[in-house]
Image (tube, rainbow, N blue to C red):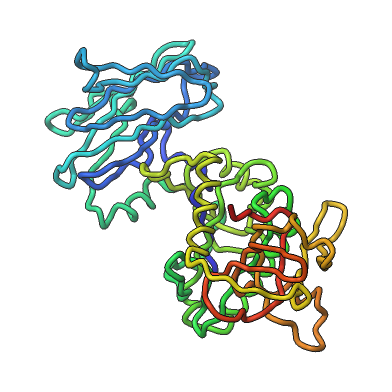
Amino acid sequence: MVSFTSLLLAATAAFTSAHVSCNPPTAPANGYFVTTIRIPHSFPNAITTNISVALPKNVTSFKPQLVSGWKVDLTYADADKTSLTGVTWYGGELPDALYADFGLQMKLPDVPVGTVFYFPITQTTNNGTLNWTSIPDANGNLPDPSHPSPKVTIVAAATTASTNSSSSTPVPAKSSSNAALTTSAVVLTENNYPLIFQGGQRIQYFVGDTNMSAVSKTFKWYVNQLAQSIAQQLGAQPKLRSGGVIINTCGWIEDMGYHLLLHTIHAFKPDMVVALGSHELYDKLVVDQSHARLYNLPKSPLAVRRSSAFRREARHQRFVDYFKAGHQINLPVSSIVLMRLRATNNRPLELRAVKDSILSDRWLHQVVAVIRPPKTNDDINQHYLRASAMGFVAIKVIDGDMITLLTPFPGPLPSTYFLGGTNTEFMQ
């Protein structure tokens, strides 16, 4: 059993009612929380042009979502603009045939379980106004049951997940009697990398590029290898099989990134896909894959978008940390075997030996993978294409017949067979 999840997958929730609602409708007290105001319809054939939300008292740190195609106006109770009381999205168009979500981040106070916070909504269309503002009176009766105000109810923290699962998670796209478990028997290192299964087997592959669009065929190949390796481990280890596996994908979900994501789903054949933070992606997955059940969860309020520059610096810092001990080893160039991955859209994945004559400045400061030595009768190309990386070294100096490698540990290397990529990250 394999369960598959990603920080940047997303799902479109099935409507539980035709009323405007908060999704999710429950939250624990005394913490940050994100909900979305879901606008499922308007008057027949009308176009919604304005969504106004009256914010509840005692809730602080409101921050509205920037919705594509819409502008935002904020209403404050004081001149200093410290107490936000209302949010209005305007300037966009929402046809009756479509729905939309308008997000709100907030900090909920420390209040008892069962406390309800109401978010009265005024929905303006080109054919009239819908007032979703009805709040229960002292006897618990709604003055206008057909237009209830959206609400968020405080629940115990331990029950939030199960409450959200039944109230705000969409109906699965595919039913199954198998419940996917998330407890894993995979043991991870301090940095959660590489995979180390019980018994000490490591599984880590070297794609050899930071740009997956440039090496999409290589990426797909190693996804297949990883899926096969995990399937073998699941078959051999009953405890691991009963625990399941969670797979986290990267956040690239457009264009080629989406195709790589689909390939990953098809390779691992997960029981479920849990999607976070993007409605458009879920809509596409409902159409393009039928193997897994699809679920929607809101993105964490603490999640932030990382810029390309931030990701590059974080990647570089991981390399710096990996080699921070600064150990070096000198080897004759003639004693190493360095193969380079090559793949294009029109050619199959292949390897080419890097000849001594071209092992020059082009390879300085590049990171290469250390591959276990092949057996005597092994086909070296097939061996390289299937071998897991034992670790990594950086090429520091190339001086004639000698090469200096930067290594994370002292002592001799376990192998002098190396795998280089097409555009490997540089060590500065």
Residue 230 visible in rendering: no
Closer to the camera, 9 or 405? Answer: 405
Quarter of the image holding residue 17? top left
The quadrant in which the N terminus is found is bottom right
Residue under the point 48% across and 63% down: 324
The residue most toward the left is: 138
The residue most toward the bottom is: 376
Residue 400 visible in rendering: yes
Q: How many marks?
A: 0
The residue most toward the front is: 400
Quarter of the image holding residue 20? top left
Q: Position of residue 190 (x, y in %)?
A: 42, 68
Closer to the camera, 411 or 277? Answer: 411
Residue under the point 60% across and 68% down: 392
Residue under the point 57% across and 84% down: 236
Q: Position of residue 419 (x, y in %)?
A: 71, 68
Closer to the camera, 85 or 370? Answer: 370
Closer to the camera, 223 or 103? Answer: 223
Q: Is residue 374 left or right of residue 300?
A: right
Q: Is residue 395 left or right of residue 187?
A: right
Q: Is 59 placed above or below 420 here?
A: above
Q: Is residue 347 left or right of residue 28?
A: right
Q: Is 324 placed above or below 134 here?
A: below
Q: Is 112 placed above or below 95 here?
A: below
Q: Is residue 4 left or right of residue 85?
A: right
Q: Position of residue 54 (x, y in %)?
A: 28, 22
Q: Position of residue 53 (x, y in %)?
A: 32, 23
Residue under the point 26% across and 32% down: 61
